Every structure is written in structure tokens, then in C-alpha cells.
Amino acid sequence: MNQLFRRKQYKASDHPSGLVRVLGVWDIVFFGIAAIIGAGSFSSLGEAVFRGGPGVIILYIICGFACGFTALCYAEFASRIPTAGSAYTYAYASFGELIAWIIGWALIMEYSFGNIYVAFSWSDYFTSFIGRIGFHIPEYLTCSYPEAKKAFLAGSENKELINAWKNAPLIGNLKLILDIPALVINGLITWLVYRGVRESKNFNNALVLMKLAVIVLIILVGVAYVNVDNWMPINPETQVASFMPNGFAGVMTAVSGVFFAYIGFDALSVLSEETKDPQKNLPRGMIISLVLCTVIYIILTLVLTGMVDYRKFDGVGDPLSFIFEKANANLPWMELTVSFVAIIAITTVLLVFQMGQPRIWYAMSRDGLMPKKFMDIHPKHKTPSFATIVTGIVVGVPILFTDKSFILDFTSIGTIFAFVLVCGGVLLLPSKEKLPGRFHMPYINSRFIFPVIFLGGLTFFYFWQPEFFHNLMEWNDAKEGEFRISMFFFLVLNIALCVLAFVKNLSLIPLMGLSSCLYLLTGMTHNNWFWFAVWFGIGLIIYFSYGYRNSKIHRELNGDLD
């Protein structure tokens, strides 16, 4: 059993020389903005606003709060272990091999399925944009087969999907329905990442500057159309005006859509071996990009919910252009501009995600947990070439038979779970010698502070939402039952953390990150957990049938290392 949790000791000389260090601190910041400000704002933000109302801003603040502490934990790991691999590498150093495999497998899920969703979103905006300028692609070539079939059988009001099903040509008894734009952009991004990180960096930085300029324009123009009454909508059931018209449970149901954006934050740490002076530049770039992106999301949410009643965002996949449509602000020039920039914004997200996954496979292959072929470095482009090609295939094939709603629900839980283990991993790290020029997480004894913060927050929430606590044990409620179950276990776990903090004198920053990320998991449904468990089951089969026996550490212990 102990061999399942054998830890890997990392040294500064462990990293190979095959990857080229070309990224500075502002390159990291730009990659962070590219990943975080993209599909989360230009697509899934609309669904988040519809579920949580104006109160969804609280969820962004909570996510920013959780990710702030997590960023410091990532930075601490990055300063100690400047190698590719992200949370996978960090888990290997702190928890051991089995947990590292679980995290690596979760990251593969996040990047693969995340990029499928982003490719679908890119296709939606691209199709919409070229439609506005007079070009038309047949509907059956701009959506997936299951998406069109589901809409037709459910009697959906989405005319594009219905037309796709009705007008699709037949090959035998099978309708020819596939998302050509999504497949094409996946192929182009895979080719760009294959060519090299230097080319990707320059392309990314140019697109990010354009994206930020238009986001600032959206905010400046949108502020003039804000109606403050929209921030306090009237609940049709209770007839009471509220910042959270669907209650706090309603806000938490938006966590998948909100946290989907933050998956890009993890992608930055896989670039360690291509970052100049990673012990200093990577932590700085991660923290700067996180702060900037969280502030942007909060302001965008305030503008959206102030301009348009939150209920109008039901099913809206392009919220930032939607607010300028004729029925809302009626600014056609802004609608067209935002649609065009959304294509650019989502392209940068695809770029960062597509760079992330091959480097996870590369790190796992280097440790023997995956076949050696994933370690291949292109002699000219200096990129993990085979892993990059496989990534393009893994993202491209499911585009043919999946749909956006399933993909979105399947991704965020893995990201938060990885964050939980990173924060927990820092708590297990021994103290280190402070060296000039490197990031050092300040130690704050949590013995008394954490219990006071937790119990104080619990008391505040009780007086703010007393009815929630009165109904906490009513788990059969159709609307809030799942959230109450999750909150019950969250409270139990935090009481245990309070005891550990008092007994073990744990560091406050990673403990706060761990607690806040555990809270975000309370917004996940049983379907999220079910498919998460299925994916992990598949991963464990692969680990015990291949990874365990071929692990580099296992072979060293048994004298089998070549």
C-alpha cells in the first residue's frame, strides 16, 4: 500500500533541456488573460447570470477569493518545483504517486473536455458573425449530431438546430450533421501549438491586446445603459425585490459556468520549463493575471445585469453581444464588434488549453506513468510533438458526438478538485530555506485565526440567511436538497479543519484556500460527481494495468531502470 503513495523528490537539475525558456513574466500574464478571459465571459457567463441573477457577482468574488489563496499555493509549489506538469507534479511531490495520477488524469479531462466546449463556442460566434456580414453556412454543418437530435426530439424553439436536423443530407440511414468550424479551428490551433511556443506566444500577445481593448469598450459603452433597478429584480414567486432573486442556492448552481473560466489559471503552471527564471516570473505572472481577470469579471457581471434583466439570459450563448442587440441597447456596431472580438478571445483560450494538455502528458510520460512516445520533442520546433498531435485528435473526435451542455457540466469539478489537492499539498510541505529572488509564502499560524474566521463567517451567514440553517437537514427538497447535503458535509469538514489547525498549527493561507475550494464544490450536482467518478474509474484501470508497473520510481526500487 505504501508504494501507491511513494513521493518523487524534485531537484533543480531534474528538468531536461529539450524545451526552450522563452517566456517572461508578462508573457505569463498574457497567457493567463488569454485563458481566463475567454469562453467564461463570452459564452458561459450568460448561463451563470440567468441562474444566479445579479447576485452571481458574489460567486465571482468567492471564486476570486478561493483562487487568490490557491494562486499563492501554486506559486509556492512553482518556486520549489520549476518543472512542467502543474498540479500533477505538485501532487507527486506532496501526496505521492497514486494521487498524482488522479490529478494528472483529472487535468487531462479538464483540458480535453474544456477545449471541446471552447471549440463549440468558437463555432457559434464564428457562424453568427459571418451570418451578420451576409454569408451563410448550412445549419447541419455548424452543430453536433446529438445537439440537433436532442433539440428536435424535445421540441426546442432553437430554429437553427431544428433546421439542421430536418435539412441534413442522409448517408444511408444516418444524417450528416457535424460542426465544421469547430473541427477546423481545432486543427489550426493544434498546428500552431505544434510549430512552437515562441510562435504561439507572439500570436497570443497580439490577440490579448485586442481583446482587452474591446472589453474596456464594452464596459465604457455599457455603463451608460445601466438601469440600477435591474440589480434588485422582483422574484415572481415571493414578489420581493432581491439581489439574489433565486436565493443563495441559485447563485451556487452557477458555479460550473463561473469556475469554467478559471481552468486556464492551472494551465499557466504547465509552462514552467518554458519560462525564464520560473521561480520568480511564474508566481508573479499567475497572481497578476488572476487579480486582473477577477476584477474584469466582476465589472462585466455588473454591466450585464445592470443593462438587461437577468431572466433574459436564458439560453444565451453570446451574452456580451446580446446586450447590444435591438431589443436591448440597440447598438448594431457594438454587436458586430463584440461578435468579431469574441472569435479572437475564444481563439486565445483554445491556444492556451491546447498548449496545456500535451505538457501534462509529457510530464506523466517522463515519470513512466504513460508511454515514452509522449516524451517525444520535435527536433526543430522543440515542442512535445506526438502529445500535441494526440491532443488534437482527442479534442477533435468527440466534437462529432458530444454537445455543449454535457461538456460544461463535466469540466469545472475537476479543476476545483485539483485546486483542493494543491492547497492541501502545501500544508504537507516541509519548511524551506529562504533564497533571494524566489517566492516564499508567508507563514501565518492558523491555530486561533482559522477557527475564528470560520465560526465568525458561519455566525454572519446564520443571521443573514437564517431560513437556510433551519431547513439544512431537509434533504428531500427538489430545489435545494443537493446543495443542503453538500453544505452539511462542508460544515463537518471545516470543523475538522478547525481542530487540525488548533492541534497542528497549520499555515493559514493554504488552509483558507482549501476551505474556500471545498465550498465551491458544494455547487456541484450528483450528475457532476457521477461522471467525475466514472472518469476516475477509467483512469484507475489504466494506472494499475500500465502506470504502476512502468512507473520510474517503481523501476528504480526494483532495479529495472534502464
Image (cartoon, grey):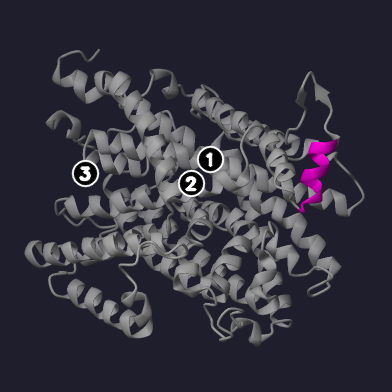
Is 296 magenta? The answer is: no
Q: Residue at x 80, y 47 (%)?
A: 160
Residue indicated by mark 1: 113
Disc 1: CA contacts within 10 A as few (<14), some (14-19) or many (>=20): many
Dot 2 or dot 3: first in sequence order is 3
Q: Which residues are magenta?
A: 157-166
- The C terminus, quarter of image: top left
Is residue 449 toward the left or the right of residue 160 in the image? left
Q: Residues within 10 Å of mark 2 (few under 14, many from 20)?
A: many
Pick out the residue farthest to the front: 476
Asked if disc 2 and disc 3 are in contact, CB closer than 8 Å, the reply is no
Vertical placement of 335 versus 87: above or below?
A: below
Image position, residue 183 (x, y; %): 69, 33
Disc on res. 295: none
* Disc assigned to residue 94: 3
Q: Is residue 371 visible?
A: yes
Residue positioned 34% across, 73% down in the render: 471
- Please name the amino acid that badge 1 sits on: Phe
Amino acid bearing label 3: Ser
What is the C-alpha distance between the residues marked 2 and 3?
24 Å
Answer left or right for 492 relative to 29: left
Looking at the rendered structure, the secondary structure element under dot 2 is: helix
Residue that protrudes farthest toward the left in the picture: 503
Can you say whether 231 is above or below 500 in the image? Answer: below
* Quadrant hosting residue 90: top left
Q: Is residue 26 visible?
A: no
Do the numbered discs 1 and 3 sit on residues whose CB atoms are within 8 Å? no
The residue indicated by pointer 2 is 411
Write the residue at 57% across / 63% down: 48
Query: In the image, what residue type sits under mark 2?
Result: Thr
**SS class of the residue under badge 1?**
helix
